[in-house]
Amino acid sequence: MEILKGKKILLGVSGGIAAFKACELLRLLVKSEALVRVVMTRSATKFVTPLTFSSLGAELVTADMWDVGRDSLDHVKWAEWADMFVVAPATANIIAKMATGIADEVLSTQLLAFSGPILLAPAMNVNMWNNYATQRNIAELNRNGVHFVGPTRGHLANLTIAEGRMNEPQNILGRICGILANRSDLTGVRILVTAGPTIEPLDPVRFISNRSSGKMGYAIARAARERGADVTLISGPVSISTPPEVKLIEIETAFQMKKAVSDSFKSVDAVIMAAAVADFKPKTYVRQKIKKGEKGLSLALVKNPDILEELASKKGKKIMVGFALETENLETFARKKMREKKLDMIIANDPTRKGAEFGSDFNKVIIFRKSKKALDLPLMPKNELAHKILDELVLLLKRRR
């Protein structure tokens, strides 16, 4: 990501089982050409060794304030070197130390000496997370301008499903970019984003769907929230964590998607339809599992509602953005869809292109805008592409105002 190129990041790792996820976060930061130094607590080294972080591209790694051969002031010099401090995972212990100003080992000392933006990715047992002392400490840090990402609800170390799971490295990376970019150009703007596939049941065990992963829509929702927007995300079934501070509405079928969009439409300023809504559904739903016959199966399909077409009639001054997935005649079909659905902008992509296949973290798109030259973008990470799309949305909102 361009915003991270050359940025100096201190990655703090405190002692929890989620420390293994810090390895993936480091990999993503290094891949984005950030300069990363890792500061570990002693307990963190019980889960992941310093050598692991060195092998993954960290410039320097420390876990001891008294490392042999180090300058006597290195415990604060690193804090002066960095542009941003990220702690992932942030345990209840390190959060408590930060809130009360304790500096009794290298990570808490560096944090106390650091004056730039700090992002914490909490990870702990649900009871520790809900404890009054932890919540009081978090409230204090929030008042002091410390940023938080997560935790999320999911499988914890004891195999229970509860809040306390560290957010995924990709989400943390997106939050880092948003903080470093200091973007607030969507503050106060209400945005509705749809994502993922819809599924149309044939019988209790079978359904018709498509190969959408939902990654593009989720990246847009996450980026919009990072830039200050009030985001509602309507999503079909996916395996992605909900972006922080985004309102999620889960659906399955096209009719459920239509209702959820219709219910939210009046209260938003812009709609970004990134979902891959199934065009057809089975004409008849069979209440019992269909048995395999010797002669095969004939399946009658009927059209699903065209959500964009129905929104066009009540668009008003709202900005509407659509997606066009095509495997041929990309520009012709995309521009046709933009005219027919009265869209302000459409993002067209071909999933058969190398690197931009279904499920990829990258995409290659062309953005078509009314009376403007098409914007043909190179292959890039979906998190980065999300911001490119939102840059165009900001221009549309300015013109509309």
Image (cartoon, grey):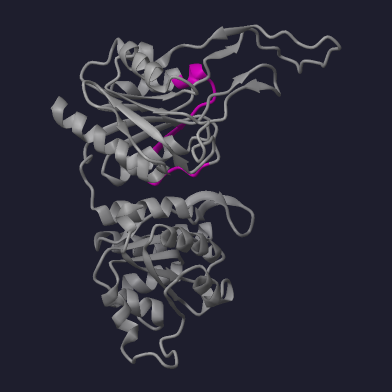
Residue at the right extreme, as displayed: 294
Give the quarter of the figure containing the C terminus.
top left
The residue lying at 36 percent from left, 30 percent from top is 366
* Residue 191 placement: quadrant: top left
In the figure, is residue 65 to the left or right of 182? Answer: right
The number of callouts visible is: 0
Up the image or down, 19 lies above or below 220; here it is: below
**Residue 162 screen position, x and y as percent:** 54, 50
Which stretch did the figure color magenta? 240-257
Q: Nearer the viewer, residue 138 or 301?
A: 301
In the figure, is residue 177 to the left or right of 240? Answer: left
The residue lying at 25 percent from left, 60 percent from top is 143
Up the image or down, 249 lies above or below 81; here it is: above
**Residue 356 screen position, x and y as percent:** 49, 37
Up the image or down, 95 lies above or below 339; here it is: below
The residue lying at 29 percent from left, 37 percent from top is 390
Q: Nearer the viewer, residue 247 or 38?
A: 38
Magenta stretch: residue 28 in it? Answer: no
The residue lying at 47 percent from left, 77 percent from top is 41
Q: Nearer the viewer, residue 338 or 394?
A: 338
Q: Nearer the viewer, residue 49 or 165?
A: 49
**Residue 334 screen position, x and y as percent:** 38, 20
Up the image or down, 149 lies above or below 134; here it is: above
- Asked whether the viewer can see residue 101, the reply is no
- Asked whether the viewer can see residue 250, the reply is yes
Magenta stretch: residue 249 in it? Answer: yes
